[in-house]
Amino acid sequence: MYNLNITLMIPESVLLLTGYGARVIFSSHLYLSNAALARTSFANTTVLSYTSGLFTLFIGVLMGQDTVNVSKVVAVLVSMAGVAMTTLGKTWAADDSQLSAS
């Protein structure tokens, strides 16, 4: 019926470099996330992490590597709405001021 047998001719050296590059990027991400947590609150780190979609789209458009379409704008708006709800919303956890009052 359909022949779905696709053979990719990617040299092993390219695969190894890609794997090592991904490892370096991921390790850098973990190190920088932990460094941010050591210097600020978890809430600030989370907000900065979840706003990365906005920055990625903005920088991609400025560099001419990406285009803006409706689905990307909606995705960024939904993400920003989630950040706003997280930042402005009430939580079940007690504040420091509530802990010191008791």
Image (cartoon, grey):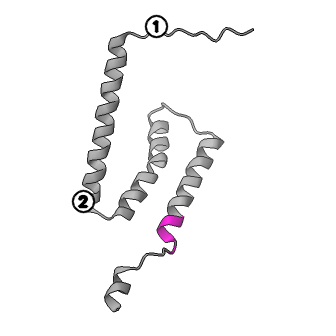
Q: Relative to residue 48, is residue 71 drawn left or right? A: right
Main secondary-structure element of the magenta-colored stretch: helix
Residue nearest the viewer, comparing 26 with 87: 26
Q: Position of residue 82 (x, y in %)?
A: 54, 59
Label 1 near label 2: C-beta < 8 Å? no
Quadrant position of the C terminus in the picture: bottom left
Q: Residue furthest front?
A: 1
Q: Judging from the image, what secondary structure is the residue with disc 1 in?
A: loop
Amino acid at dot 2: Ala
Residue nearest the viewer, comparing 79 with 18: 18
Q: Position of residue 97 (x, y in %)?
A: 35, 85
Q: Residue at x 44, y 40 (%)?
A: 59
Label 1: how many residues lie within 10 Å, few (<14), some (14-19) or many (20+)? few
Q: What residue would you read off at disc 1? A: 9
Amino acid at dot 1: Met
Vertical side of 15 occupied by 56: above or below: below
Q: Residue at x 37, y 18 (%)?
A: 15
Quadrant hosting residue 94 = bottom left
Across the whole image, how many numbered discs are drawn on residues? 2
Labelled disc at residue 38? 2
Q: CA distance from mark 2 to mark 1?
A: 45 Å
Q: Relative to residue 34, is residue 53 drawn left or right? A: right
In the image, the segment drawn in magenta is 85-90
